[in-house]
Image (spheres, rainbow, N blue to C red):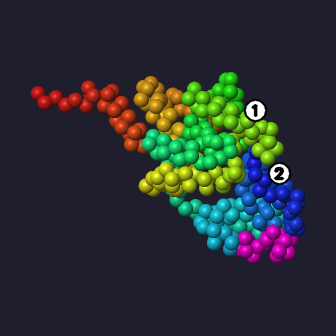
């Protein structure tokens, strides 16, 4: 897929079930899923089957598959077990002797820690540290983080933007093949557009360059991958003095998308008006099919509580007054 790191080559699968593993991926994607887990797990399962000489998934195969996951942590166990159970259900259509893992085969996922919603001071420190990261062109990593926060992009959406996807005249980003292969257009604020134009001039100075392709976001010498982006972000957080908030996981680039949603909601509260009536606009902007998918981004912060309390007292002050006569 354009703009993505090639994780595996399904043509190189060697096990007796190689053709079924390929058709399983095709089946999942025909349903509209990207199914990245398949890209991660299919080569490993194929290698295990080939090394063991198994011609079908047995109980012993499943135990061997899960043994390695146990050393990687509880999340790895859940993901691997879920993938194997789905593949075994698929294989059951062709081979009735395929082992079918019971529901308890997939352990309960560990409690998910909260997302970090950065304060204005933390954002300033993060962008200042990102700006100091030496890249070619300069500011490539910083502009990526800016688009995550200012436009609410998913990290991958920002990384795979091409030069043609950025309309400088109209100030609009064309975000293609997001979740469920949807497309959307994302307008930029004047301040964001100005920063993007400055970066664009530096980026255009490097074209044409076959090593860079048509990527808009480039932060050479670092690789334009999700792993590299996460590692660099951790380094930037350390330099900026930004740590995980209480009860939250370590900061991730995706937290900037969460911060965008919360800050947008906070701005609407401060402007007055019908905030709930605007949530569908936020959902559309963020690429969600329904508002319910946006709700998980709307975390309660001290600022939101203060605004909600102020509006409550402003509207209900007369009702709350107690007569002492």
Viewer-proximal residue among 31 and 224: 224
Mark 2, residue position: 26
The answer to whether 169 appears left or right of 272 in the picture is right
Give the quarter of the image for residue 3.
top right
Give the quarter of the image for residue 102.
bottom right
Residue at left offset 60%, top offset 53%? 232
Q: Which residues are magenta?
A: 47-65
Viewer-proximal residue among 24 and 190: 190
Q: Position of residue 122 (x, y in %)?
A: 46, 45
Q: Position of residue 231 (x, y in %)?
A: 61, 56
Viewer-proximal residue among 13 and 279: 13
Q: Position of residue 325 (x, y in %)?
A: 11, 27
Secondary structure that dominates the magenta span: helix
Q: Position of residue 73 (x, y in %)?
A: 60, 67
Q: Is residue 225 above or below residue 267?
A: below
Mark 1, residue position: 164
Q: Is residue 131 above or below residue 66?
A: above
Residue at left offset 43%, top offset 55%? 246
Q: CA distance from mark 1 to mark 2?
A: 29 Å
């Amino acid at each position: 897929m354009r703009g993505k790191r090639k994780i595996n080559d399904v043509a190189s699968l060697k096990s007796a079930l190689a053709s079924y593993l390929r058709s399983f991926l095709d089946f999942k994607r025909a349903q509209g899923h990207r199914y990245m887990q398949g890209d991660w797990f299919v080569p490993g399962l194929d290698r295990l089957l080939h090394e063991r000489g198994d011609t079908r998934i047995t109980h012993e195969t499943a135990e061997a598959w899960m043994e390695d996951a146990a050393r990687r942590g509880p999340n790895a166990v859940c993901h691997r077990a879920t993938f194997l159970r789905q593949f075994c259900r698929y294989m059951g259509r062709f081979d009735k002797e395929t082992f079918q893992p019971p529901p308890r085969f997939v352990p309960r996922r560990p409690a998910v820690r909260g997302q970090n919603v950065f304060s204005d001071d933390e954002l300033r420190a993060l962008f200042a540290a990102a700006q100091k990261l030496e890249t070619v062109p300069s500011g490539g990593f910083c502009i990526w983080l800016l688009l995550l926060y200012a436009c609410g992009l998913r990290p991958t959406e920002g990384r795979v933007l091409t030069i043609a996807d950025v309309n400088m005249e109209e100030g609009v980003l064309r975000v293609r093949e997001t979740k469920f292969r949807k497309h959307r257009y994302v307008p930029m604020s004047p301040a964001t557009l100005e920063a993007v134009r400055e970066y664009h001039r530096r980026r255009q100075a490097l074209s044409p360059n076959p090593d860079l392709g048509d990527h808009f976001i480039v932060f050479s010498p670092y690789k334009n991958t999700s792993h590299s982006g996460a590692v660099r972000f951790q380094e930037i957080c350390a330099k900026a003095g930004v740590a995980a908030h209480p009860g939250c996981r370590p900061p991730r680039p995706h937290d900037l998308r969460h911060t965008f949603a919360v800050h947008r909601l906070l701005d609407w509260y401060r402007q007055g008006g019908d905030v709930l009536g605007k949530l569908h606009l936020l959902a559309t902007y963020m690429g969600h099919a329904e508002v319910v998918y946006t709700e998980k981004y709307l975390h309660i912060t001290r600022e939101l509580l203060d605004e909600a309390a102020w509006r409550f007292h402003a509207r209900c002050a007369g009702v709350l007054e107690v007569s002492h006569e």
